[in-house]
Image: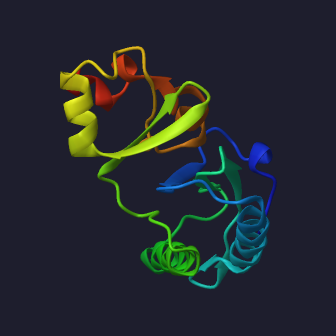
Amino acid sequence: MLVNFESLSDTARVWIYQANRSFSEEELVEISAALDRFISEWTAHGSDLKAGYELKYKRFIIIALDQDFASASGCSIDASVHFIQQLEKKYDVVLLDKMNVSYKQGIHIAYKPLGDFKKMAKDKAVSKNTIVFNNLVTNKYEYINNWEVPASDSWHGRFL
């Protein structure tokens, strides 16, 4: 069952998918409609799942699930990954590669392979104050409070 993202509790589980490029306005409308359909029909062992989503910075898909209502099963998680893979194919975009880093560069969002980010840190092209996106957060509270943080406050800090 699709619910408003804001209505989900702080303990809702989150999955963050970062795109290797910005989506166009048209793509965002289509992706939003696809997410509405997918989440409305998303189930675990025949039971509805209570979930919502956000699209941030034209690059991130954040899906949150109220596990107090019903927990995701292996099959339901597989279904969500399959859905994301379909988006990757349709829009020729990378969403599942976790070995990439997104960070703020002024008002823009930059996306680099982890190796390039490490080199940039070594070359002092990014600093402990660079705002990074910590896509390893696991629940809505962490997403709200620890997703968009200075590199020094994230796992990215180990490279600085």
For residue 72, say whether it is visible: yes
Tally the numbered discs: 0
Q: Nearer the viewer, residue 17 or 23?
A: 23
For residue 158, say whether it is visible: no
Q: Residue, x 36% and y 27% (percent of image)?
A: 154
Q: Is residue 13 left or right of residue 129?
A: right
Q: Is residue 87 above or below residue 119?
A: below
Q: Is residue 11 above or below residue 160?
A: below
Q: Quadrant of residue 136?
A: top left
Identify the image quadrant of the C terminus.
Answer: top left
Question: Residue 96: x, y in percent?
Answer: 41, 64
Question: Residue 4: x, y in percent?
Answer: 81, 53
Q: Is residue 18 left or right of residue 61?
A: left
Q: Is residue 56 left or right of residue 155?
A: right
Q: Residue, x 71% and y 63% (percent of image)?
A: 50
Q: Residue, x 25% and y 41% (percent of image)?
A: 116
Say how the picture is coloured.
rainbow
Residue most toward the bottom?
A: 46
Question: Residue 122: x, y in percent?
Answer: 18, 23
Identify the image quadrant of the N terminus.
Answer: bottom right
Question: Residue 41: x, y in percent?
Answer: 72, 80
Q: Nearer the viewer, residue 138 or 87?
A: 87
Q: Is residue 103 above or below residue 153?
A: below
Q: Residue, x 69% and y 42% (percent of image)?
A: 9
